[in-house]
Amino acid sequence: MAKRKVDHNGEFQIVSAPDYLPVPQLRTLQLQRLRRIVERAGSRVPFYRERFKELGIAAEDVQSLEDIQKLPFTQKTDLRDTYPFGLFASPMKEVVRLHASSGTTGKPIVVAYTDRDVRVWSSVMVRTFAACGLHAGDIIQNAYGYGLFTGGLGAHYGAEALGATVIPISGGNTDRQIAVMKDFGVTALCCTPSYFLHLAERAKALGVDLSELPLRAGIFGAEPWSDSMREHIESDTGIRAQDIYGLSEIIGPGVGSECLERGGLHIFEDHFYPEIIDPETGRVLPEGEEGELVLTTLSKEAMPMIRYRTRDVTMLLTEPCPCGRTLRRIKRVGRRSDDMFIIRGVNIFPSQVETALLQVEGTLPHYQIELTRREGLDQMAVSVEVTPEFFSDTVKGLEQLEQRLIKALEHVLGLRVEVKLVEPQTLKRSEGKARRVIDNREL
């Protein structure tokens, strides 16, 4: 039976494995934390105080979890408009860590952590790694970027707290990554899926067979990736590819994770409350309907987020998971509501292009989409690398492969687009998030 104790904030904590809490207890804990975080945001953050005042709501109006719908949304532009510290709910003397985005599309996003926030972050990353089948004794090579990016340190602290041996190699220097993986007996690797593809490709060129190494698991996140890419990774390297989910605005990695059943990603909803909304109207959708994921931090002290619009498109899955976790799951995020582009009236997501390409034998999971405009009409061309065997084939064979790819894309997209077959190793590789779309329409 679960025990209860009082923490330093006077909040009742339920002492048991949080992933397996009985649902009524979980909902009680969520409501308790939601009411506290709304009060904290409204009393300490001028931005939220004004928003609540405009809507005529106060913390005491939150009497049930459904009342979260009365609260305002928060968007990325709000973080940029209040740059750098305008959304902090803790004085700087209590902030022990700052992280920030790269700021490539404007002012960077700055996020803050108290000591308690860092401990929560470590705990949800421990739960992430445990859900993915890792344990004390594993040797984890962490190739997420260290520094202001949240990925590196978030994974690092969690892996150490798990009891694993951590190799803080960060991103880049691929040949060294492979040497370390081989020499140190690495059993798990953390990085973006696109970087792992590059790493596996380079290992093959160096004569290193990853399937013969102790490496058994890849913990991949920070960008959408398809089931087809997972199948390619697993068949090519023999590892188990696990998907994790997080975003800096909420905490970093550690918001959710697949378990070994891989039937969606469990959200650690004792700390992050999930909703699915219609991205156009903001209306909350029932479980099982696809829409935009919205998250509210339930325990973040330094920088609480109320109903943050992630722009990630997914759905809440309703059926219980065979693993026994009572935490709700989301469907794997394959696209974002803001990475869509429109060609001749057709809405297209890069993930759709990836799915179509990998259905055709002879292609490699390296592609790039270029958008141009000729004589007032939008044009789309997809460059895709093909295997050495196919590239050395006859001209007729290459033409046939090109036509198969054009048809596959037309079937998935409902649009006929240009396909360019290129040699292996032709397209630029990424050591972080892959850049799939180059939009030259305004040039």
Image (cartoon, helix red, strand yellow):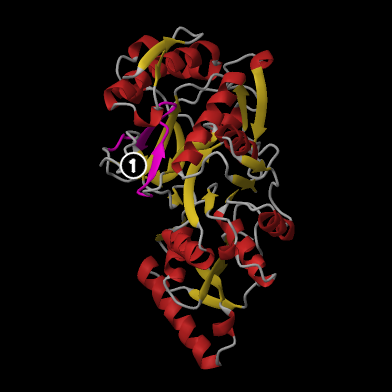
Magenta span main SS? loop
Q: Report helix, strand or loop for mark 1.
A: loop
At 65% from the left and 15% from the top, the residue drawn is 94
Magenta range = 262-285
**288 to the left or right of 201:** left
Q: Where is residue 331 in the image (x, y as percent from the top left)?
A: 36, 47
The residue shown at (35%, 40%) is 329
From what the image shows, is residue 108 above or below residue 331? Answer: above
The quadrant of the rendering that contains the C terminus is: bottom right
Q: Which image quadrant for residue 278?
A: top left
Above/below status of 147 relative to 68? below
Q: Name which residue type carries label 1.
A: Cys
Question: Is the residue marked by circle 1 packed among few (<14), some (14-19), or many (20+) residues within 10 Å?
Answer: few
**Which residue, given by chain and number where applicable, does mark 1 sit on?**
323
Q: Which residue lies furthest to the front in this view?
A: 137
Quadrant assignment, res 320: top left
Horizontal side of residue 130 vs 425, given as left or right: left
Q: In this orientation, does residue 371 appear?
A: no
Horizontal relation, residue 134 to residue 165: left or right: left
Q: Which residue is drawn at 55% across and 47% down?
A: 222
Front in this rendered view, residue 177 or 137: 137
Image position of 297 with respect to 154: above or below: above
Q: Where is residue 349 in the image (x, y as percent from the top left)?
A: 45, 58
Q: Nearer the viewer, residue 148 or 59?
A: 148
Quadrant location of the N terminus?
Answer: top left
Residue sitting at x 47%, y 39%? 130
Q: Is residue 97 inside the magenta stretch? A: no
Question: Residue 420 at x, y = what percent?
Answer: 55, 77
* Residue 133 in sight from this viewpoint: yes
Where residue 42 appears, x then y in whole percent?
Answer: 48, 14
